[in-house]
Amino acid sequence: KKIELKDVREVKAKDELGVTVLSLSGDLLLELLCDDEVARDDLVEGLSELLRDSRKEMGGGESTENTPTRGKTVMERTAKQAYFMERDIELTNKRRAAEKRKEKFMKESGGLKYTALAMAARE
């Protein structure tokens, strides 16, 4: 199984000879057992440096709070934002058209006079 760097939150030493790799959600992705402490420390340092460098390239910085959210790219977020802006404009136009139709019927029928009388007659 492959582990993508964008899915890794942190790499840390565990116990005397163990290494753990955690996902963005905090789940355990990988657990390793090294032969000695020097190998473990080298592995943790190397993987942590690789993780930091990949985040710098993706624009996430070194902080774990700034990690990308589940692989969303800037283009995907921009496309999503554009879609919702267009949808908002479309709904606003529909609402205005419905108000114009309603206004036309209200003028022709004399308002809600007959509706009010019908509702009063039900009781």
Image (spheres, rainbow, N blue to C red):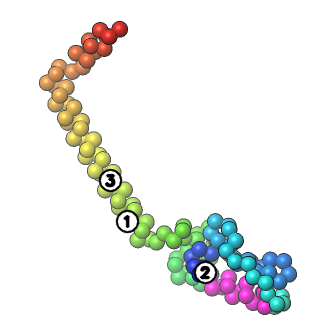
Residue 87 shows which numbered tag? 3
Return the x and y of residue 10 as percentages of the image width and height. 68, 75
- Mark 1–mark 2 CB contact (< 8 Å): no
Whichever of callouts 2 and 3 sits on the residue coming sooner in the sequence is 2
Residue 33 shows which numbered tag? none
- Mark 2–mark 3 CB contact (< 8 Å): no
Under tag 2, what secondary structure?
Answer: loop
**Rendered residue at 70%/71% (across/down):** 28
**Rendered residue at 57%/76% (across/down):** 6
**Rendered residue at 61%/80% (across/down):** 1
Whichever of callouts 1 and 2 sits on the residue coming sooner in the sequence is 2
The residue stretch that appears in magenta:
39-51
Residue underneath mark 2: 1
Q: Disc 2 and disc 3: Cα gap in Å?
A: 40 Å
Return the x and y of residue 50 as percentages of the image width and height. 63, 85
Going by the numbered disc 1, the residue's amino acid type is Ala
Under tag 3, what secondary structure?
Answer: helix
**Rendered residue at 83%/83% (across/down):** 17
Going by the numbered disc 2, the residue's amino acid type is Lys
Residue underneath mark 1: 79
